[in-house]
Image: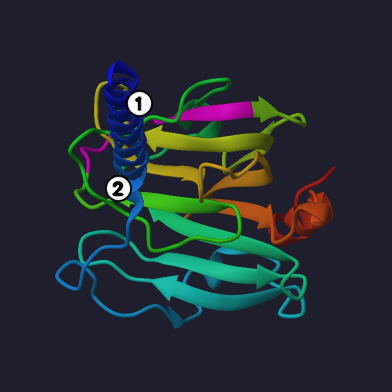
Amino acid sequence: MYRKYLKYAIGVIAIFLVVKFIILIVNSYSKLVPLNKSTSVDLPKITNTYLNIFPNADTTLIKPSYTYFNKLKNPIATFQISKGQYDLLVYKIDNVESPASLSKVIQARFDQKVKVTNDLVYDASYKNNYIRFGDAVSKPKAGKHIYLNFDGTLTGKPVINDSLAYYKVNINGFSGQYDLNGIVDFYVKPRTVLSKKVETNLVFYKKDHNVYMALFFPNQSHNGHNDEVIFNLFKLKK
């Protein structure tokens, strides 16, 4: 009789632990679900949004893909690169006060945890094979810097000047905010808990007093980095 009740108790405890684990996973990714119709302006559609920021936009190299719209924030535009071998995400950042040289604006830290603001909803409509991009619904207060926390490492030397900051990284994700004590405005996290680190090229580009963020990553892991594409798009020198 004792063994019977012991087995029953172990079974109940096991079920409880499994349910608790599932709840933990759901809570971890709850901020990455797409927004409902009350927040979305329109369904994603193919546009040329942000295409004009590229000084050397070769139409044989870059092809506009879906743009994601939101009532409160700037659109998130995506592009296919090199016939779909790579994805490019572009986002306009409004929260930098009169941006000076990007060498002073961008503050990057590596081997950090991806930050997120509790009790804040994020629009994660965009996802690819590896990641989801989360964009805070509410607009944060503007600041003089963009603070980046990377869960990963640099794999190449950064290129940073007045109008451009280029990072070649191997990451699980990263987050960005404009005040160290303020809310996290955007972040990239793995699409699933089983996703591995992804090689990513990240560019911040200043044009006409605006700052744009461009995320470039392979569609398949075997594609790896392709610096030539980034160099061509932004007219960078090796």
- Which residues, given as a range, are shown in magenta? 140-152
Query: Residue 147 sits in which quadrant?
Result: top left
Query: Residue 87 sits in which quadrant?
Result: bottom right
Residue 141: image x %, image y %? 20, 37
Q: Is residue 151 magenta?
A: yes
Q: Which mark is residue 7?
A: 1
Query: Residue 76 sits in which quadrant?
Result: bottom left
For marks 2 and 1 on the same chain, the one whose residue lies earlier in the sequence: 1
Q: Identify which residue is drawn at 30% across, 47% down.
A: 31
Callout 2 amino acid:
Ser
Residue 189: image x %, image y %? 48, 43
Q: Which mark is residue 230?
A: none
The relative height of residue 236 versus residue 87 in the rendered view (above or below) is above
Callout 1 amino acid:
Lys
Secondary element under disc 1, as helix, strand or loop, is helix
- The mark closer to the camera, 2 or 1, is 1
Residue 30: image x %, image y %? 30, 47
Secondary element under disc 2, as helix, strand or loop, is helix
Residue 130: image x %, image y %? 59, 53
Q: Is residue 94 magenta?
A: no
Q: Residue furthest left?
A: 38
Can the viewer see residue 96?
no
